[in-house]
C-alpha cells in the first residue's frame, strides 16, 4: 500500500506539474491584445518600409504600417495599388495582399489566388506560384487612394484612409534565400528519378524519341543557371555528342522547382544499327537556387535508351560558349560587345553611352542657302488671348498639331533619342500650361511632308514617347536674362525612340490650347528657292489632316536631340556545319531571358561554300550567296556555312546590360 501511495503521490505531482506547464505554455501563446482604441483611431499610413529604396530584393515582402486596425474586407488591388513602370505605361504587379492588425503585407512570390487557396482548410496548396517575385531592376509605383475616393482602405469602423499616399521603389537582382541551405535534386515528384513526358514504357523501359526530360529540385532554381551547354548536359554515349535542346519551366507547375529539357529535333535514331540511343544526363553544381547557392552535389543519372524510329536522323549542334575569340568577327569590338574579355566565358553587351546634344539650328547654320529668321506659335498655342497679350499670341481654342521633318545629316549616328528640346526661344516667351499633350517620333522615307499625318511617317508606326501635361516656366525662371539662352526641354519621355541612323526623322507634337502661347524661332527659305516642305500644321489638335499654311512657308524649328547609344551587336565569323544540306532548328540562347528591361535578339545568316584558295580541297563561305540576317532559322536550311549576330539593348534607366553564356544552333544532316 505504501508503494502505491507513493506512486499515487508522484503521479499527482507529475500531473500537476504537467498541467502547470501546459497552462504556462497556453498563457505564453495567448494572443497579444491590441489597444481597443486602435479600432476607432483615424486611419493614416505611418510608414512604408520600402519607401524610395533602390535595392529592394526580388522576393522581399512589402510592409505598410497604419495608425489604426484595418478592416480586412477593404483590402484589395484598388485600395493598395502596386504597379511596374514600363515604356508603354504602368502594369499591375503580381503578388498577394494580406492585412494583419495595423499592417498590410504584399508578397510578390505568390498570386492572390494562390495565397487565398493556401489558407483554406485542408488545402493542398503549399508551393508559391510566382517564386521569382518582382522583376529585376524594375521601377515600381505605390498608390493608396484616400477619401473622397470611393475605393480606400478602412479602419474597423469603416472610416476611410484620411490622406493619399504615393511612393516608388526599384528592385535589384538579388533574393533572400527562400529555403536555407543548398538545393538538391529530388526527382520527379520526389522519386529521386528523372521524369519523362510521355512516361517511359513500363514493359520495355524505352523512352520515346521525342520525349521531354523532367527535373525536380527541393526548392526554386534560377533558370538562368540551367545552361544546356554546360550545367545540364544530355549526351548520346556512343558518339559522345550532346543532344541539342532547351530548358524551360514546367508549364503546368509554377513552383519554380520543376523544369523540362526539350530536345530541339528529338533524340534521333542510330540508323546505322537500327536502334535508339543510350543517353546520359548530368547536372553540375553550376545549377543554383535563387539566392545563388549551388546544387549540393553533381548528379549523373542512370543511362536510358530511346525508341528507334526509322527515318528519324540524329542532329548535331553548332555551339559557342564565348570562352575565346576564335569565332568572333572583329566588328563586334567596334560595336561595343565584350566577348570573353571583361568576364571569362561570357558575351556582354556594352554599357549605354551618352552623345553630346545634337542641336539643329537652320536659323544659324551655314547651308549655302539664304535663310531668314521668323517666328511662329504652333504647336504651343493659346486657347484664348491671355492677359499678357501681344507677342504674336492669337486665339486658337482647338489647339494645334505640328509635324517637323529632319534628315540624317541633322541627327547624326544611330542611337536612342531620349529627349527633345525646342528653341532657342524668341523674346516673347511666357509661362504656360498645356493639358494632355502627345509627342511622337517616327522614321520616314519621304522628303516632303504632306497633309496626311499617317503617310508622313511611313516606316513602321510612330512611337508615342510622352502623353500628359506640359508646364513651361517663364524664361527668367530658367535662363539668366530670359531670352535666347538655350533650348527648352519638352517633357521627359516615358519611352525612348531608337533612331536607325539612315532614314529621315519626324517629330510630331499635338497640344490642346494652353493658357498662354509659346513663340518658337524658326528658319524659312524665301519663295523661289527650292527647299523641301518639312513642316505640316493644323490649328486643331484633333484634325485628321494638316490644313494650315501647308507649303506657305517652308520652315524648320530649331530642335535639340538628346541621344544615348544603348544597342550593341556581337557578330561571329561564318562557321562550317558538318553537312552540305542541313535542316536547322531555332537557336538556343542561354540564359533564356534577360532581367532588368534588357532585350536580346539572335539572328542567323547562311551562305554556301566556295573553294578556299589557301587550303586545296577546302571550302570557305561565299558571302555573295548569303541569306541576310533573319530570326527564322528555317530560312538558313541548305546552307553549309552559318554565322550569328546578337543584338543587345541595354536599360537606359538602370544601365543594366545583356549577359549571354552560350548559343547553340541545332541542325539535322
Image (cartoon, helix red, strand yellow):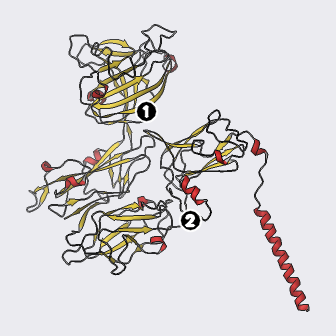
* Residue 414 percent location from the top left of the image: 30, 36
User: How many numbered markers are drawn?
Assistant: 2
Residue most extreme to the right: 2
* Residue 429 percent location from the top left of the image: 46, 14
The quarter in which the C terminus is drawn is bottom left
Give the image quarter of residue 546. Answer: top left
Q: Which residue is painted at 13% across and 52% down in the image?
A: 622
The quarter in which the N terminus is drawn is bottom right
Image position of 525 (left or right of 623): right
Residue 81 visible somewhere in the drawing: yes
Q: Whole-Å distance between the Cαs marked 2 and 1?
A: 47 Å
For residue 586, above or below residue 275: above
Element class at badge 1: loop
Q: Residues within 10 Å of mark 1 (few under 14, many from 20)?
A: some
Image position of 618 (left or right of 506): left
Give the image quarter of residue 235. Answer: bottom left
Label placed on residue 519: none
Q: Which residue is painted at 28% across and 44% down in the image?
A: 334
Of mark 2 and mark 1, the one earlier in the sequence is 2
**Which residue lies under the disc numbered 2?**
124
**Which residue lies under the disc numbered 1?**
493
* Residue 73 percent location from the top left of the image: 65, 47
* Residue 328 percent location from the top left of the image: 26, 53
629 or 324: nearer the eye?
A: 629
Residue most extreme to the front: 121
Residue 574 visible somewhere in the drawing: no
Mark 2 or 1: in front is 2
For residue 337, above or below residue 448: below
Q: Which residue is painted at 37% across and 30% down in the image?
A: 440
Amino acid at each position: 500500500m505504501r508503494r502505491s501511495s507513493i506512486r499515487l503521490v508522484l503521479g499527482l505531482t507529475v500531473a500537476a506539474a504537467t498541467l502547470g506547464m501546459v497552462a504556462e505554455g497556453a498563457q505564453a501563446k495567448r494572443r497579444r491584445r491590441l489597444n481597443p482604441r486602435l479600432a476607432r483611431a483615424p486611419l493614416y499610413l505611418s510608414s512604408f518600409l520600402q519607401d524610395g529604396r533602390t535595392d529592394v530584393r526580388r522576393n522581399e515582402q512589402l510592409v505598410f504600417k497604419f495608425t489604426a486596425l484595418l478592416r480586412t474586407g477593404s483590402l484589395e488591388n484598388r485600395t493598395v495599388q502596386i504597379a511596374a513602370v514600363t515604356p508603354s505605361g504602368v502594369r499591375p504587379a503580381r503578388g498577394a495582399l494580406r492585412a494583419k492588425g495595423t499592417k498590410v503585407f504584399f508578397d510578390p512570390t505568390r498570386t492572390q489566388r494562390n495565397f487565398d487557396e493556401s489558407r483554406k482548410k485542408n488545402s493542398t496548396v503549399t508551393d508559391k506560384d510566382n517564386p521569382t517575385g518582382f522583376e529585376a531592376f524594375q521601377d515600381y509605383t505605390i498608390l493608396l487612394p484616400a477619401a473622397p475616393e470611393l475605393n480606400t482602405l478602412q479602419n474597423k469602423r469603416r472610416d476611410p484612409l484620411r490622406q493619399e499616399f504615393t511612393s516608388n521603389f526599384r528592385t535589384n537582382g538579388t533574393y533572400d534565400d527562400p529555403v536555407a541551405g543548398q538545393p538538391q535534386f529530388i526527382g520527379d515528384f520526389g522519386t529521386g528519378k528523372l521524369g519523362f513526358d510521355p512516361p517511359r514504357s513500363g514493359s520495355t523501359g524505352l523512352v520515346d524519341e521525342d520525349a521531354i526530360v523532367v527535373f525536380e529540385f527541393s526548392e526554386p532554381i534560377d533558370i538562368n543557371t540551367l545552361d544546356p551547354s554546360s550545367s545540364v548536359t544530355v549526351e548520346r554515349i556512343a558518339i559522345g555528342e550532346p543532344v541539342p535542346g532547351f530548358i524551360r519551366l514546367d508549364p503546368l507547375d509554377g513552383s519554380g522547382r520543376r523544369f523540362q529539357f526539350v530536345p530541339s529535333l528529338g533524340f534521333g535514331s542510330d540508323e546505322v544499327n537500327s536502334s535508339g540511343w543510350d543517353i546520359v544526363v548530368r547536372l553540375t553544381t553550376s545549377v543554383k537556387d535563387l539566392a545563388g547557392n549551388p546544387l549540393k552535389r553533381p548528379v549523373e543519372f542512370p543511362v536510358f535508351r530511346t525508341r528507334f524510329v526509322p527515318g528519324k536522323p540524329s542532329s548535331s549542334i553548332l555551339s559557342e560558349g564565348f570562352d575565346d575569340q576564335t569565332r568572333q568577327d572583329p566588328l563586334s569590338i567596334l560595336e561595343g560587345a565584350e566577348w570573353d574579355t571583361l568576364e571569362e566565358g561570357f558575351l556582354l553587351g556594352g554599357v549605354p553611352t551618352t552623345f553630346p546634344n545634337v542641336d539643329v539650328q537652320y536659323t544659324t547654320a551655314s547651308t549655302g542657302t539664304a535663310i531668314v529668321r521668323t517666328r511662329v506659335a504652333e504647336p504651343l498655342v493659346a486657347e484664348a488671348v491671355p492677359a499678357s497679350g501681344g507677342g504674336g499670341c492669337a486665339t486658337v481654342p482647338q489647339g494645334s498639331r505640328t509635324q517637323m521633318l529632319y534628315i540624317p545629316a541633322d541627327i547624326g549616328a544611330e542611337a536612342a533619342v531620349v529627349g527633345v528640346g525646342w528653341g532657342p526661344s524668341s523674346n516673347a516667351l511666357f509661362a504656360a500650361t498645356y493639358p494632355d499633350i502627345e509627342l511622337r517620333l517616327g522614321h520616314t522615307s519621304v522628303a516632303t511632308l504632306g497633309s496626311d499625318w499617317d503617310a508622313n511617317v511611313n516606316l513602321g508606326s510612330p512611337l508615342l514617347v510622352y502623353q500628359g501635361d506640359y508646364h513651361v516656366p517663364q524664361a527668367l525662371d530658367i535662363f539668366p536674362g530670359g531670352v535666347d539662352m538655350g533650348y527648352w526641354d519638352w517633357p521627359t519621355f516615358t519611352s525612348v525612340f531608337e533612331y536607325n541612323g539612315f532614314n529621315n526623322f519626324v517629330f510630331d507634337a499635338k497640344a490642346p490650347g494652353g493658357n498662354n502661347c509659346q513663340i518658337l524661332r524658326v528658319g524659312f527659305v524665301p519663295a523661289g528657292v527650292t527647299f523641301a516642305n518639312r513642316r505640316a500644321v493644323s490649328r486643331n489638335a484633333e484634325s485628321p489632316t494638316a490644313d494650315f499654311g501647308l507649303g506657305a512657308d517652308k520652315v524648320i524649328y530649331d530642335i535639340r536631340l538628346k541621344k544615348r547609344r544603348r544597342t550593341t551587336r556581337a557578330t561571329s565569323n561564318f562557321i562550317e556545319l558538318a553537312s552540305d544540306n542541313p535542316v536547322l532548328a531555332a537557336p538556343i540562347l542561354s540564359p533564356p531571358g534577360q532581367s532588368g528591361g534588357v532585350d536580346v535578339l539572335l539572328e542567323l545568316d547562311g551562305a554556301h561554300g566556295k573553294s578556299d584558295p589557301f587550303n586545296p580541297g577546302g571550302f570557305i563561305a561565299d558571302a555573295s550567296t548569303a541569306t541576310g540576317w533573319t530570326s527564322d532559322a528555317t530560312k538558313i536550311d541548305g546552307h553549309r556555312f552559318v554565322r550569328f549576330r546578337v543584338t543587345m539593348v541595354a536599360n537606359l534607366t538602370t544601365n543594366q546590360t545583356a549577359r549571354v553564356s552560350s548559343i547553340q544552333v541545332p541542325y539535322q544532316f
